[in-house]
Image (cartoon, grey):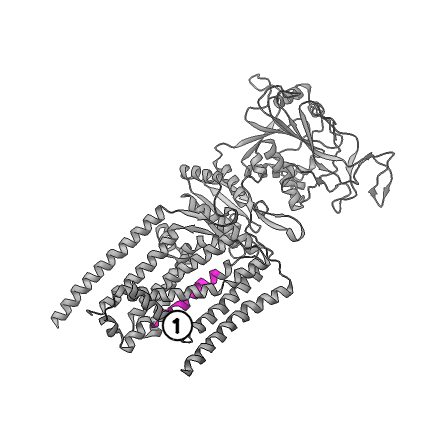
Amino acid sequence: MRVAWAIFKKELQIYFVSPLAYVFLGVFLLLAGLFFYMGVTSTGEASLRVMLGNLGISLLFLLPLLTMRHFADELRGGTFELMMTAPVPLWALLLGKWASTLALCAILLAGTGLFPAILAYYGDPDWGVVATSYLGLFLCCGAFVAAGLFSSSLTDEPVAGGMLGVVILLPFWIVGNTSELVDAAWLRELFRQLSFLTHLEPFSKGVIDTAAIAWFLLFTFGFLFLTWRSIESRRWR
Amino acid sequence: MNQVWKRRLAYGGNASLVTAMVVGVLVLLYVLADAYRVRWDLSAESRNTLQADTEAKLALLDADGREVEIVAFTHQRGKDDSYLRDRAVADLLKEIDAHSRVVHYRIVDFDRERLTAERLGVTDYGRIVVMRGEDRVDIKDRDMFRRVGRGADKDLEFRGEAALSRAFSQLLSPTRRVVYVLRGHGEPDPQDRGPGGLSEMVSALDIERFDVEALSLARTDREGHAPQVPDDASLVVIAGPTGPLTHQEEDILLEYLAEGGAVLVALDIGSPVPGFVVRMGIRVPDGMAMDTRLVFPYRDRPVPVYKAHPLTEGLREGDRIVMLGAPAPLSLADPPPEGARLDPVLVTGRDGWIERGGPTEGGNPVYQPDIDGAGPVVMAAAVQLLPGRGIVRSSKGIARAVVIGDSEWMTNALLQEGPGNRDLLLNTIHWLAGDDQRLGATVGRRAATRRLALTREETGRLRAISLFLLPSLVALLGLAVWTTRRGR
């Protein structure tokens, strides 16, 4: 666990000593501000629902850009072999990288904390809904980061890794909207269950649903496992 | 080379197998989590938690097993609160769908899917159609949302769960109820589709799962039985009789009320007043109820003031006018007869009076103290007769009656023309039939409309903070770090 912690700190440091995190944070907050302003002025409601809903899809495109370098850079730079031969358990490496990006996500989300404060100043937001919406988005970030790490482990081209991440995640987003177009009930239900939207829905309304939490955790674990298998396979491929 | 491929195949096969097994375990875990899910509703007023009453009805629908389809039409885009209304409806329907195996919903864009609207005969935004087999219940937008409060405190109240719960009740109701319309005294015909007929009333009651049957109390039936109000009667309607009721009819109706029955009496100017109405403490003085506020362009249709009563539920909030054609004034006994409770429902304004002729001004009647009766004037009243006292001798239950000084309001012409006539009719029928739940907001709840009333200046400030201040701060911080690092 100490190794995972060391990797976590190192990776987080890398984010913040380079302009990457700041550019990312700036773009993210600009988008968040835009969605917040649009949501509040168009609905006239003291709610973050529009903002957080739009941030979800934005993060789907943005987070693979953050995770794309994690393994692809190591592969391209030739440090991957070094990493694999170092006395570092693979799970610790994975956990450290995943947690560091998730910590960055937490910082990003914390950056939007000003918006509920503004709502509280001018109106009376539903704090239960605000809290669960943030929880849902945070769980969603964990899943996005895990899928991003997996895509990064598949290629030694960071850009390709980033794009692959979007390609992997996007169907899980849109499949919920397209489920209504399917006639077969079982297929419709399958599509619904596979969708991020279905599982984000309760959080956006102020409901904590253990099944939705389980879905995000299992999705995250599944992609971390696939990443582990993908990296592991490089030993014998 | 062969050795390398064999090794890859072995490792690859093993990896694929383990991966497939792990994915299988994850799917299984999710299926278990889904089956044993626990939900905590942290929203204010637990907005996302269905009331026990609704859940019970959904359980009954599930037990019945027949599919229930809910088609919800969207509100007019861009119109005030349309986004909030659509979202409140969608949230509720999702919740209902999640609680039932047989109830499914579909949200239809009214502007884009006109064919669906036409197929279902829907012509207004925000309507919800609940269907099960041949049965269908329509819920209008005004039954889902209500404006409450005044001025800055004006808010939108969402009563969708109550409305849908009522719709489920109607679908679950195993039998249709019967409203009997008394005939034989020149009353309008329930089957007549002309302006003076009652076919619109029949259609409106049909949606509410009431059948309308004609009732004759003047003659014995073919088998020689004395006439009586049938046992399955939910209520009896006496609409605009032009001739008097016989003593036998009076006795039968009195007996029916004494057993806890319900009667709607609509009388016109000059109509003979049934004796049981007088016994309940209501008289019909000569003249016509008149007011300075009239429904344009008519000169004999005062704008009624709604008194707080279940009959005016929804009318007061919606400011919908009930059109009465030349209403007769009602005089309520004070004190009321023993065991009777008399409530005025529709009255004229404070400037109203009982018009009894005399000179007019510009064609409009004016109040003449020496000729006319002083107002305000009652035009409709609700009566409750308590059991064991006065008229109701048995202890079967409260008898109810509504007396309205006009019968034209419930004809086809005014049911279509009067914005509030249909609501008054349905409220009256449901109240008389004892469906108090239909009228009250027993499972209503506040909407998720937490308003943010911003001034222009505040909007500008919000824009500056959201779009410029935060991103600029981060950009400056990033620039500082980058400059510092570059210097090392």
Q: Quadrant of the C terminus of chain B?
A: bottom left
How many marks are shown on the rendered structure? 1
Letter of the chain that mark 1 sits on in the rendering: A
Disc 1 on helix, strand or loop?
helix
Residue at the spot x=54%, y=26% of the render?
B232
What crowding class fits label 1: few (fewer than 14 Cα within 10 Å), some (14-19), or many (20 or more)? some
**What is the magenta segment's predominant secondary structure?**
helix
Left or right of B33 in this view: B431: right
Can residue A86 be seen at all in this image of the molecule? yes
As rendered, which of B252 and B141 lies closer to the eye?
B141
Which residue, given by chain and number where applicable, does mark 1 sit on?
A: A15
Left or right of B260 in this view: A28: left
Residue at the spot x=33%, y=51% of the render?
B30
Residue B100 in the image: state x and y as whole percent.
42, 43
Can residue B196 be seen at all in this image of the molecule? no
Q: Quadrant of residue B315?
A: top right
Residue B221: say if magenta: no
Q: Quadrant of residue B384?
A: top right
Q: Say what amino acid the circle numbered 1 marks.
A: Tyr
Residue B176 in the image: state x and y as whole percent.
52, 32
Left or right of B277 in this view: A216: left
Q: Residue furthest top?
A: B224
In the rendered image, the vertical position of residue B189 relative to residue A60, given as above or below: above
Residue B261 in the image: state x and y as whole percent.
60, 25
Q: Residue furthest bottom?
A: B487
In the rendered image, the vertical position of residue B285 relative to residue B109, given as above or below: above
As rendered, which of A119 and B428 lies closer to the eye?
A119
Residue A126 in the image: state x and y as whole percent.
53, 53
In the rendered image, the vertical position of residue B484 relative to residue B181, given as above or below: below
Please report the bounds of the magenta region as a residue range: A52-69
